[in-house]
Amino acid sequence: MINWLANPARFMRLSAKAVPWCGWTAVVVLALGLFWSLVVAPPDYQQGDTVRIMYVHVPSAWMALSVYLFVAVASAVALVWRHPLAEVAARAAAPIGAAFTFVCLATGSLWGRPMWGAWWVWDARLTSVLILFFLYLGYIALVNAFDDPSRGGRAGAVLALVGVVNLPIVKFSVDWWNTLHQPASVMRVGGPSIDIAMLAPLLIMAVGFSLLFVVLLILRMRTALNERKAMALRLNAGAMPAPRPGRDRAVSAHTAVP
Amino acid sequence: MGDIGAFLAMGGYAGFVWSAYGVAFAVLGGLAVYSWRRYRDSNVTLERLQQDLGKRR
């Protein structure tokens, strides 16, 4: 399956059909999730209406972790098998993961202020998520820091893989250390401890965020492949009066312009 | 009308709840719009480039 999808031309053909389907499904699911979160779901008996922040905070936290895992796995595949799409996928996913992590931090802060009395505390959960955010930013800066994209890709892939050590720290920080942050109430041994009336909108929002990730990932990968193709065409056209595909691929921009 | 007022007030936590949803909408919506625009531009650029090269050939 992975090898079959490895062909960029095949990816372009299939993904063109997937974009509108995933896109509109994401819009519908997110609209349903927002209505359920803001209107249908009951206020919490202790936290009142602030509990509604959970429906964006928790799914974005799940996305922050799973998108990082995606970047790391894609980086490993790019390093080991030189899969032509893996590096493109990792680069395309990282800014989406950074956006979800930022949303997680900002909404957490807005939830912490009324419930804990503090915008921010330097405890294990919050600090490890902040480090996750910086790992994303570091990866994005690193892959764009080299003139030679393949060198930037390799350096970024190594950083992404080293950063994986932070994922279990984020996940288990609430069990390993004393913290203001509450422990897991959905993905825990013994099943979710949260009532169905709140679990339902939470899961719908999580599905909506996942679909949004898939759509944005495909769009950004298609953009990268388009830009790469345009670059190759420009280089070829500059090197010769008429482009002949398959030759003079290695001519640099400097020698191409007399 | 009172219902809508109560809904907007969010039990006295309007500032926190609406800011949280606003941040999420702005960041994720902004990324979506940016990604879509850049994708559209890359399509236009590539098509134009292919047309130009086709003419020269």
Image (cartoon, rainbow, N blue to C red):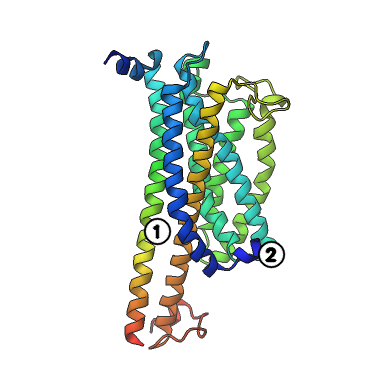
Disc 2 from disc 1: Cα separation:
27 Å
Please report the residue visible at 39 percent of the width from the left and 81 percent of the height from the top.
Answer: A257
Residue A4, placed above or below residue A204: below
Residue A113 in the image: state x and y as whole percent. Answer: 47, 19
Image quadrant containing the C terminus of chain A = bottom left
Q: Secondary structure at mark 2?
A: helix
Please report the residue visible at 46 percent of the width from the left and 75 percent of the height from the top.
Answer: A232
Residue B5, placed above or below residue A164: above
Left or right: A137, with A3 as reference point: left
Residue A221, placed above or below residue A194: below
Examine the image and state in which quarter residue A180 appears: top right
Please report the residue visible at 45 percent of the width from the left and 54 percent of the height from the top.
Answer: A19
The answer to whether residue A117 of the structure is visible from this angle is no
* Chain bearing mark 2: A
The answer to whether residue A103 of the structure is visible from this angle is yes
Left or right: A153, with A113 as reference point: right
Residue A255 in the image: state x and y as whole percent. Answer: 45, 82
Left or right: A92, with A180 as reference point: left
Q: Residues within 10 Å of mark 1 (few under 14, many from 20)?
A: some
Q: Residues within 10 Å of mark 2 (few under 14, many from 20)?
A: few
Image quadrant containing the N terminus of chain A = bottom right
Q: Secondary structure at mark 1?
A: helix
Please report the residue visible at 33 percent of the width from the left and 77 percent of the height from the top.
Answer: B51
* Of the pair A125 and A65, the residue shown nearer to us: A65
CB contact under 8 Å: marks 2 and 1: no
Q: Amino acid at mark 1?
A: Tyr
Residue A93 in the image: state x and y as whole percent. Answer: 53, 51
Label 1 belongs to which residue?
B39
Examine the image and state in which quarter residue A241 appears: bottom left
Label 2 belongs to which residue?
A81
Pick out the residue farthest to the top.
Answer: A45
